[in-house]
Image (cartoon, rainbow, N blue to C red):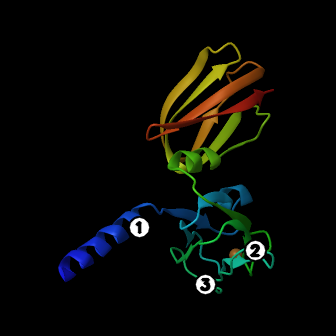
Amino acid sequence: MRKLTLLTIVLLMGLFTNAQTTFNLDWFSGVPSGDVTITIDVGDSVEWTWADTLPHSVTNDAGAQETFDSGILTGSGTTFTYTFTQVGVNPYHCNVHSGMIGTITVEQGLSVEDKFAMNVNFFPNPVQNALTITSLYSLDSYQITDILGKTVMLTKVSGNVVDVNTASLNAGIYFVTVTSEGMETTFKVVKR
Ligand SMILES: [Cu+2]
């Protein structure tokens, strides 16, 4: 009986752990705020990795929902991980470099599909010759269709940052669909 109870607890813990995700963010001087601003689920963790050789901290702003502070650490590859347990908004910064800022927004009950769709960013918009797409989940492909629904680009990719050469597109409105492991989300881009 005691063995069965222990086994049950271990199994339940396994189920609970599997539901949570750790998201990795590169943390370095000059990091675009949009790259370190994400929306996650209650119980998810964020792991920041120092991606240059300068000293940095990951420190919550005064008005943040939760309190977290790595202290000032130095060394490429250094990491700091924090698990968010409350619904709320957590702006944060580096105590050494005033330009290093981001926000972790925590919501309740997000599916993986939600988290994928909420954490795809693209710039600039309107676009001229080069569109950059960033995603918290590694992307598998992008497809660009025009306003009439005709596919003008369909490309397999791999990674969290994708650069799209848009020089050949005529001026107009386009829909960009990105996919990751069977999930997809679409956004609208204007080409000038
Ligand atoms: Cu810094």
For the image, the number of numbered tags is 3
Check residue 64 in the rendering and tell me which mark sits there, or answer none: 2
* Of residues 23 and 171, the one drawn nearer to the viewer in this rendering: 23
Which quarter is ligand 1 in?
bottom right
* Nearer to us: label 2 or label 1: 1
Mark 3 surroundings: few (<14), some (14-19) or many (≥20) residues within 10 A = some
Identify the secondary structure beneath mark 1. Answer: helix
- Disc with the residue nearer the chain's start (1 vs 3): 1
Residue 47 lies in quadrant: bottom right
> Mark 3 to mark 2: distance in Å?
21 Å
* Nearer to us: label 1 or label 3: 1
**Image point 64% across, 15% down: which residue?**
149
Check residue 124 in the rendering and tell me which mark sits there, or answer none: none
- Disc with the residue nearer the chain's start (2 vs 1): 1
What amino acid type is highlighted by mark number 2?
Ala
What amino acid type is highlighted by mark number 3?
Leu
The residue under label 3 is 73
The residue under label 1 is 17
- Measured from the top left, where is residue 77 in percent x and y? 50, 74
Identify the secondary structure beneath mark 3. Answer: loop
> Mark 1 to mark 3: distance in Å?
28 Å
- Disc with the residue nearer the chain's start (3 vs 2): 2
Lateral position of residue 22 relative to residue 50, left or right: left
What amino acid type is highlighted by mark number 1?
Thr
